[in-house]
Amino acid sequence: MAKRRSLLARLLRRALWLALIAAALVVGWAALYRVVDPPTTVLIEQERRRLGQAAQTWRPLSEISPHLARAAAAAEDARFCDHRGFDFVEIEAARARAAAGGRLRGASTISQQTAKNAFLWTDRSWTRKALEAGFTVLIETLWGKRRIMEVYLNVAEFGEGVFGAEAAARRWFDKGADALTPTEAARLAAILPSPRTRNPARPSDAVARRARAIAHGAETLRVQRRDRCFL
């Protein structure tokens, strides 16, 4: 019995050390991406294998039109500057809609989406969601909002095999990301929920309506200075 307890204690100590090493590696990975641009993502590599190629050119936030940063916030996370990674107001609203029988809609923030895109895979498992929550806390703590927005705009999917603001601007509007107009930025943000089936250059009526609403929201963010944390 004593030998069994001793073996169990050694196994527990080993498991604890392994857990601590894994945690240190994860924190170090997140800290590294604060200053080093992610070279690729799981989704980019999946699409590269599927299509044979994937377009992405990294640009610092200073070389991306501020119209696109505001449009992305307006479309995906209007309270980006107000929360610490999780928008509990939107989470509660989504829960209430679902309870009332309404359409189920996600409440992922830009921080959560960036954590998923930069570090993880894309399925909807509880394991992935738990890891996403952990990475969200890390990047909110280690990066700050401006870096989160910068990484988000460089790894988000804007079309089949098209990743990041620069590749999107070139693909859809034949210009650099720094030259996007408010209308073009809003149209790019409008396709984010379904980038493989929507065309920002020739938007459908539904995408055009959504783009106009996003442009209005982006202007509201500008006027109210609710873009201050990332611009």
Image: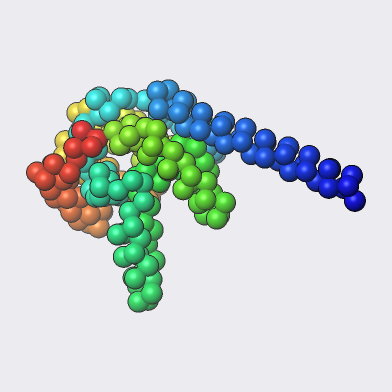
Q: Name the image quarter holding residue 92.
A: bottom left
Q: Nearer the viewer, residue 184 or 133?
A: 133
Given the current orientation, which residue lies at the most extreme left position? 223
Q: Is residue 154 left or right of residue 207?
A: right
Question: Percent x, y for residue 5?
Answer: 83, 47
Question: Percent x, y for residue 187?
Answer: 24, 45
Q: Residue at x 50, y 51 (%)?
A: 129
Q: Nearer the viewer, residue 123 or 32?
A: 32
Q: Name the image quarter holding residue 150.
A: top left
Note whether 183 is above or below 124 in the view shown. above
Question: Percent x, y for residue 147?
Answer: 33, 31
Asked whether residue 100 is in view, the answer is: yes
Q: Name the image quarter holding residue 185.
A: top left
Check the image and tell me how it is coloured: rainbow
Q: Is residue 211 left or right of residue 139?
A: left
Q: Nearer the viewer, residue 197 or 215?
A: 215
Labels in figure, total:
0
Given the current orientation, which residue lies at the most extreme front position? 2
Given the current orientation, which residue lies at the most extreme bottom position? 100
Question: Percent x, y for residue 64?
Answer: 25, 29
Q: Residue at x 42, y 23 (%)?
A: 36
Q: Residue at x 57, y 51 (%)?
A: 127
User: Where is the C terminus found, in terms of image quarters?
Assistant: top left
Q: Nearer the viewer, residue 227 or 52?
A: 227
Q: Residue at x 34, y 71 (%)?
A: 96
Asked whether residue 48 is in view, the answer is: no
Note whether 129 is above or below 184 in the view shown. below
